[in-house]
Amino acid sequence: MSKTKDRRIEQDQFRDYLATVNEKGGRNWIYPKKPSGRYYRARNIVALLLLGFFFSGPFIEINGQPLLMIDVIEREFVIFGVAFWPQDLHLLVFGMLAFILGVVLFTTIFGRLFCGWACPQTIFMEMVFRRIEYWIEGDASDQIRLKKAPWNAEKILKKGSKHAIFYGMAFLISNLFLAYVMGKDDWIELVTDPPSEHLAGLSAMIIFSGVFYGVFAFMREQVCHFVCPYGRMQSVMLDNNSINVMYDYVRGESRARVGDRKKVESGAFSIADLGLEEGATFGDCIDCYQCVQVCPMGIDIRNGTQLECTHCTACIDACDDIMDKIDKPRGLIRYSSENAIRSEKRKILTPRIMGYSAVLLALLTTFVVLLSMRSDLETTILRERGTLFQELPDNRISNIYTIKVINKTFEEIDYELALISPPGQLVSLGMINSVPGQSLVEGRFMVQISKEHLDGLQTDISFIVMADGEQIETVKTGFLGPNN
């Protein structure tokens, strides 16, 4: 059982402990106090918008195509209504590099702002599952009392209903997750047909539901601590100019409770009796632990920037509320940087930021140029494996080729291939006349060329590709002939 006092760690020892692990190696279950305040209200609005987008995303279409579909098994990828194929790997490489560097740049400037405001784990945990828990079991103190209580009808009802709703939510999330993976049409077919016709899909649904239920009902903050790679890497992205949720130790120290301050003022205690150095003065922090009580990660933000902190701003709201009550200015805990607090120097445009920005700009420019050059139709022509050339009457030589055509659009395209150089004849052995949308079609053909037009053992030949009557590209390959 975790109480706030059990998680209080001395300031010079906090890096040696995890707030969620007790002295025996067991788990300190976190019961955060229900947050309230201006940042919590703002996060609620942002969460509602993002949840609305998440739940409606699979049903949003652009030009009749899904907004986002990532079908890894079938290798079908649709992003903003545009279909991408594995042949677009070069775009994926530059896009991923730009995305990763963008994350690094954003984190270097704004810390883990994404974790607190937009991360799906935080939004579902704090804005959905935690709110359901508050609604059924009450605030932190009520939850602790319920945990200690014997198993009676009330406890069974509350625990049972909470976990039933949790699993229902996890089942809903897993369905939407599958809709993003397989597309809404296939997902509707999956949920409306008899389960016996979609055993693989049904199994995936049950597995994902169990995973999401386990994450939000039991693992909770452990996902951020031990699973999330972004959280693990943030320490190498931050520097003293990064903006984080920070405690203003210059203004807050030396901290002391209100009662202790009155005892010192009345002469009952001395400064030394409170463990402070002689001549120390009281700061604005009254050591009320409200910032610790509301923290869903179980940390004390006054110990400085920590790996566990997701920048959820609950401590800011709790501290601002206390500052209002003791007639002190808000912002003892706020968005700031180490340099801004220590020396009041605010600097965002550092050489590091400029370097990251320059590389990111170069990557984005390359990605946009490659994207603009991307063809809707991709043709690959190769001489048939294991064949050489054949000598024909009339002093002609022939080669056999295989052709693969990928149509990256969603519409069927009339297809035509013609030999343009050197002069010769193209004979169909199963030629392609049309290519359905979102498909790959294969064919065979023969090219016959007179010896007088050959350059010897290897001759370069060119084809033009016509799509719906328009020339869209030129394809080159080699032609084998006798060496004379």
Image (cartoon, rainbow, N blue to C red):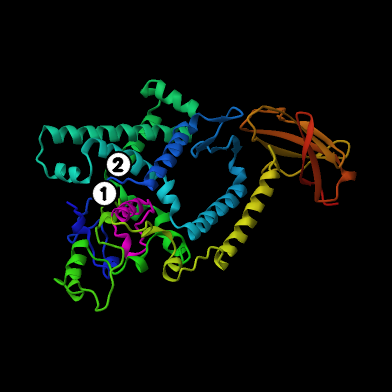
Q: Residue 103: horizontal and vertical position, in percent?
A: 51, 54
Residue 205 visible in the picture: yes
In the figure, residue 164 lies in which quadrant? top left
Q: Are marks 2 and 1 in contact (CB under 8 Å)?
A: yes
Q: Mark 1: few, some, or many residues within 10 Å (few <14, many ≥20)?
A: many
Residue at 50%, 59% in the rendered image = 109
Residue at 69%, 44% in the rendered image = 372
Q: Which of 56 and 172 is in front in this view?
A: 56
Q: What residue type is labelled 2?
A: Arg
Q: Is residue 80 left or right of residue 19?
A: right
State how many labels appear.
2
Disc 1 is placed on an element classified as loop
Q: What residue type is labelled 1?
A: Pro
Residue 183 visible in the picture: no
Q: Is residue 154 above or below residue 462?
A: above
Q: Residue 256: horizontal and vertical position, in percent?
A: 24, 66
Residue holding disc 2: 130
Extreme-front residue of the structure:
266
Q: Residue 217: horizontal and vertical position, in percent?
A: 27, 42
Q: Does the magenta stretch include residue 439?
A: no
Q: Which of 346 and 69 is in front in this view?
A: 346
Q: Is residue 47 left or right of residue 96?
A: left
Q: Residue 414: horizontal and vertical position, in percent?
A: 73, 27
In the figure, residue 387 lies in which quadrant? top right
Residue holding disc 1: 32
Q: What stretch is highlighted in magenta?
A: 297-325
